[in-house]
Amino acid sequence: MTSTIFFQQLINAISLGSLYGLVAIGYTMVYGILRLINFAHGDLLMFAAYVAIYMGALTVFPWYLSFPAAILATGILGILLDRAAYRPLRDAPRISLLISAIGASFLMQNLALVIIGGVPKAFPRPEVFDRVITLFDVRIQVLAIYTPIITIILLLGLLFIVYRTKVGKAMRAASKDFETTRLMGINVNAVIAMTFFLGSTLAAAGGLMWAMRFPQVNPFMGVFPGLKAFIAAVVGGIGNIVGAVIGGFILGLGEILIVAFVPQLAQYRDAFAFVILILVLLFRPTGIMGEPITDKS
Amino acid sequence: MLDVHELHVYYGGIHALKGVHLKVNEGQVVTLIGANGAGKSSTLRAIVGLVKPQKGHIRFKGEDLTRLSTHQIIRKGMGISPEGRRVFANLTVLENLELGAYHQTAKDFAQQQEWVYSLFPRLREREGQLTGTLSGGEQQMVALGRALMSKPRLLLLDEPSLGLAPLVVEEVFRIIQTINEQGATILLVEQNAMAALSIAHYAYVLETGRVILEGEGMELLQDDRVRHAYLGE
């Protein structure tokens, strides 16, 4: 393999990994506060992509309006998801929440199937992201450069919110102890809604970049990136935001580089993520950056 | 200021509070004593809305609280140091205090912070430390300080002496008295009847979900039944 191809693959891998990481943040945040694997999280990618397509199709909106609108709409959908599927089960056993999450995921996929139909739609890639540049003799699509940069910026913004603002402090408090957080006069439901909003907007950003990378949008497009991102969150240590991004990078790098070095394994690409998951669960169940598991009472 | 009337609380089929009543007047220290399982904590939990009473009412400054949720009740002007301290171990001491002052302005925060630090100089030294690394007594100070950060009209303390060394218990009660002298009204739930009665203006003795005895603190300290049942004489 020549160094140019390697370099190209490396950028490709970092870009894919950062996408996984972006989506994984949402899993990890919701898990941190509710101890719930939000299986409907992946479907938010699909929602964001469709909103952007339909807003773009009205042609009045350029991408720099339709993308933020899609992100905002997905954030609100995340809040509604919590309100409808999880909040009524706040005091229920955790397994009920999990089942509700799976139900919400199926509902979103099938609603999309009924309303929009199963035929994949092309995602219009804005020209800004479509350009190709040459870097050290390697031709690279700018999207692959922008994706990790956007991810890092969003990650830093999120860390600022979580560690430097009042609501972030309330989120960290609620993740340890709902009752005492309420006793501080804090509306825990509002804090949870905020968590869903933030996680969902990041999923939407990931969904739009995913749709630009693989510009075929269908009602089930969120399933695989959702699963991979979930694995990334577990690998990084579920509940840990930075861990989620690191897990994403590990997954992206592993998938692409294995295929690059051992092309015979190309068909097993998707299996790689699951092998990693099994290994992590066997040998380091709390993930790379995870804290020892303490049960929240 | 606080008026609890005929309070009944059930946990499933268990009748935990069977018509508890109590009054806390402005400026007082009122204590609620009783053995384990007498219903002290249930009464406190009902006041702050963590459990909903089936019957009875709770009035704070004349307003009925029974339909409000916990965070709304707290914002009416209460501060609480819950049973078992329940500090946020994963947050620093300063962050714990900031959460106590969640709805305060920056100016009020600075003022309250100074006051809390003057009461507990140790907390200033430990400001940046994770609360989980502190000793039990220091964590109790964080819990008390956190409860004071919201400038509460009424301070609710649930067993602040639990699990502390005798010397530290003395210090905690001395500080509770200081806080009261500086104007806060206090409802103190305690198992340490002796210490609680000696600083209380008024006291209620709870047994199996009922108030079986009430009176001024000093008066109850002399009462034979109290001495017998709670002071081991």
Image (spheres, coloured by chain):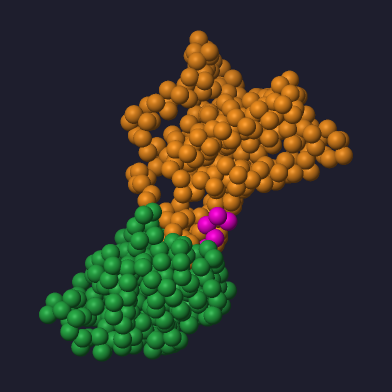
Image spot of residue A183 (x, y percent):
46, 65
Magenta stretch: includes residue A188: yes
The residue located at (65%, 39%) in the rendering is A204
Q: Colour of chain A?
A: orange
Observer-nearest of B18 and A216: B18
Task: Classify residue B232 by image quadrant.
Answer: bottom left
Q: Colour of chain B?
A: green
Magenta stretch, residue numbers: A186-190
Q: Is residue B81 visible?
A: no
Label tally: 0
Task: Classify residue A78 by image quadrant.
Answer: top right
The residue located at (75%, 44%) in the rendering is A69
The residue located at (54%, 33%) in the rendering is A102
Side of A269 relative to A44 (left or right): left
Magenta stretch: includes residue B82: no
Q: Is residue A110 visible?
A: yes
Observer-nearest of B83 and A144: B83
Side of A225 relative to A219 (left or right): left
Q: Principal SS element in the magenta part?
A: helix
